[in-house]
Image (cartoon, rainbow, N blue to C red):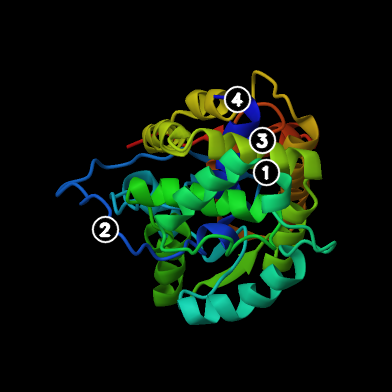
Amino acid sequence: MKKFLTGLLAFTAFSTPAFAQQAPAPTAPVAAAPAELPDADPAMWVVRDEDTTIYLLGTFHMLDGRPWFNDEVKTAFDASSELVLEVLLPEDMAQQQAIMGPLVMQYAVDPQGRTISSRLTAAENEALNRQLSGLGVPAGAFDRFEPWFVSLTLVQIAAQRLNLNAAHSPEMVLRRAARERGMTEGQLETSDFQIRMLDSVPEESQLRGLKELIADPDAGVRTLQPMLDAWARGDERAIAAITMQDSGNDDPAFYDILFTNRNATWAQWIDDRLDRPGTVFVAVGAGHLVGRGSVQEHLTRLNIQSQRVPAQ
């Protein structure tokens, strides 16, 4: 598995909830989910000062319905009066599409009018159309779009093969629970920011990632499964290793856009939030809370200490 491809898969799993929500509905049946799924125990950290407590939960933006909202996570959430996510999206899919549709047309369509088919070989075009046909997508339907958007669609296909769905994501579960309690809700980013971020990935990186996914249709499943398993164990070292956070990568500009720059911004948000009293529950993709350049590493540079919350 090439390092860049692993980072590309982390787009959906750990980094862009706005797009994890946009998985196309499958037209072919997927494998039935197990009757009983194992309980997940995701990693969580806490930052405190004299009058403020901020919990940091690492999420997986698409899940298979396994239980996780319990034990220390539920205890921390129940003690909080404010929920903050990467981005706030409506639970209703029609409302989501009303928000995301215009953004997709603005940023995901190639501004120079180039087609995907013209940038791939005949064999690559055939393989791409074969993969997309699993979603009932006609050949050439994504031809006008940029490589990053087509790549995310292929990642969604892999997620569906593992019965992963954004409807089961921690973000959706937490929002429903927050509404029931009347909690204040906030976001660190906007949908517009996230789609512009994806669009800013260098074109060479975009096309390379797409070609890697086309060449190996099973790569997504082979990588998403261990990502999910590591998240469920709360294994921060395994997540860092899978996403190449600790061992370096072959596309530092891509990783800076996806992880490092955003982590620094979020650490500054936490620093500012500590100036006001209260208890805040923050949930962001788990990939942002592990390895070099993590949110916690940036907090340390701001002389702010974080602690891992012990699992119950």
Instruction: Return the disc, 1 or 3, that comes first in the chain's sequence.
Output: 1
Q: Are marks 1 and 3 in contact (CB under 8 Å)?
A: no
Asked whether residue 59 appears in the rendered view, the answer is yes
In whole angstroms, how far apart are the C-alphas of marks 1 and 2? 29 Å
Mark 1 or 2, which is nearer the eye? Answer: 1
**Residue with the mark numbered 2:** 29
Dot 3: element: helix
Tell me the tag on residue 2: 4
Mark 2 or 3, which is nearer the eye? Answer: 2
Q: Residue furthest right?
A: 112
Q: Image quadrant of residue 17?
A: bottom right
Dot 1: element: loop
Report the amino acid beneath label 1: Leu
Instruction: Tell me the quadrant of the picture where the C terminus can be found.
Output: top left
In whole angstroms, how far apart are the C-alphas of marks 2 and 3? 41 Å
Q: Are marks 4 and 3 in contact (CB under 8 Å)?
A: no
In whole angstroms, how far apart are the C-alphas of marks 1 and 4? 19 Å
Q: Image quadrant of residue 291?
A: top right
Report the amino acid beneath label 4: Lys
* Residue drawn at x 66%, y 45% as measured from the top left: 49
Q: Indicate whether 212 appears above or below 73.
A: above
In whole angstroms, how far apart are the C-alphas of marks 1 and 3? 40 Å
Instruction: Return the disc, 1 or 4, that comes first in the chain's sequence.
Output: 4
* Residue drawn at x 79%, y 45% as measured from the top left: 203
Instruction: Return the disc, 4 or 2, that comes first in the chain's sequence.
Output: 4
Report the amino acid beneath label 2: Pro
Viewer-proximal residue among 195 and 303: 195
Mark 4 or 3, which is nearer the eye? Answer: 4
